Image (tube, rainbow, N blue to C red):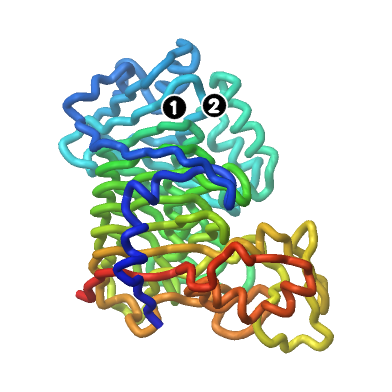
Amino acid sequence: MRPHLTSEQAVSFSRDNVLRYVGTAGADQDDPWSPARLECAALVPDYLVDHGRDCATVQQAVNRAVRDKRRGRVVIGVAAGVHAGLVYVPRAPFTVTILGLGDTPADVVLSETIDAEMYGAEYEQRFGAQFRDAPESIAAIFRRISKLSPISTANASVLRVENDGFQMVNLTVRNTYNCDRDQGGDHVMNNHGQYRSGQHQAVALLVAGADRVQVQDVVLRSLQDTLYLQSPRKGTTVRSCFTDCEIEGDVDFIFGQSTVWFEGCTIRSLGGRALKTWATAPSTDIRTRYGFVFHDCDFISDELDGTRHFLGRQWFEGVRATPFGTPDVAGYSVSLGEVSDYLEPSGTISLATLNSVGKCVILRSRIGAHIDLHQPWDEWSGNHWNPRHRPVLYAASDMLEPLNTWLRDQDLHYEDIAPQTPFLAEFGTVDV
């Protein structure tokens, strides 16, 4: 199924509308934001990252800006070359621009290997030296993550951005994790030494609750979970704008809760490892106006090897027990609870999980032949009922109608949600 917006519906998905609203779902703030194109020639670095010169690493430049008690916008220029190490950009009284000083984004590479199944002790051993002398606002992030085992997807990024107003232009961010961490079991490897299944989240860029993030002419590379667009907390949204970027991966490689505009971007699905790939996995709250919106983008793949490629699936975030479908577990029941949990045959689902419907609209873009054009959107957690399963929700009615009785029994009300509200849709797309 491939639902399309009407011309009247498509009007509301303009760039200015999508990037206009921020804050609590259903009670958002009208805060217009229309970022202008970044001109590299007009950006003058305050700090230069170049081996053996001003700052040896990007993190050192960020540290210096914090210690120097900067205000306004701080531009960090990064010289051509491969720059190893993690980069954490904290909330601060200044905004950060990271500027690649090469001729193309490929000339400047921020690169590191980190994955979600890494334990805190390994994380501390590998990266502790990078943060030993960091200011407290940055060191506190490192200490918190080092206490976790495993560190989880939300802490497994090469670049972590908590800085409102952050900008990045003309460089590459690459997570070089090869999906090769042994997790036990009978997982099969491919010819590249990569496990075809298991938990292999490895984020290149994490926008960790930051608002008004602008990314332009940037390449993001990883396999699973390349770009994580995280809201500050469940039931809220912040905004990012990606222009003329290239984002590649295989499993759920553009995912999260926040509102994002993509324009002129290339979305590259990688085959050869996972049996299925999903370009997107939004978990937008049902009352957040916009999730992911792609305009004038190209969805491509260089590898047609039998892998099934999808535009995406809606991340049923935190689910343990689903209210959808016909269960095959005797005595199965699920009710609303403070947390999402399941102990067969009974479970609970939190309101935050239930409301994580996931919204993605693709406008005037080109969709490659690698995508299953008859079924471009996939279900969550497989194509048959299980306690975490959810069918594709193309519109609000696909949630509200089948759950009508269950919602009434839980005293949950969605009268403010129009049944025809689109969650997944296209407009003016071309199959190529």
**Residue 35 relative to residue 324: left or right:** left
Q: Are marks 2 and 1 in contact (CB under 8 Å)?
A: yes
**Residue 192 relative to residue 417: left or right:** left
Instruction: Give the secondary structure at mark 2.
Output: helix
* Residue denoted by label 1: 59
State the quadrant of the N terminus.
Answer: bottom left
* Residue denoted by label 2: 131
Instruction: Mark yes or no: residue 155 visible.
Output: no
When asked about the image quadrant of residue 327, the answer is bottom right
Residue 201: image location, x then y, percent? 52, 57
Q: Residue at x 65, y 50 (%)?
A: 150
Amino acid type of disc 1?
Gln
Q: Residue at x 61, y 79 (%)?
A: 401
When asked about the image quadrant of residue 409, the answer is bottom right
When asked about the image quadrant of residue 290, the answer is bottom left
Residue 339: image location, x then y, percent? 76, 58
Of residues 177 and 143, the one drawn nearer to the viewer in this rendering: 143
Q: Spatial distance from mark 2 to mark 1, Cα to Cα?
A: 8 Å
Instruction: Give the secondary structure at mark 1.
Output: helix
Of residues 143 and 294, the one drawn nearer to the viewer in this rendering: 294
**Residue 54 relative to residue 175: left or right:** left
Reply above or below: 226 against 349: above
Q: Residue at x 53, y 68 (%)?
A: 418
Of residues 229 and 284, the one drawn nearer to the viewer in this rendering: 284
Reply above or below: 249 against 258: below
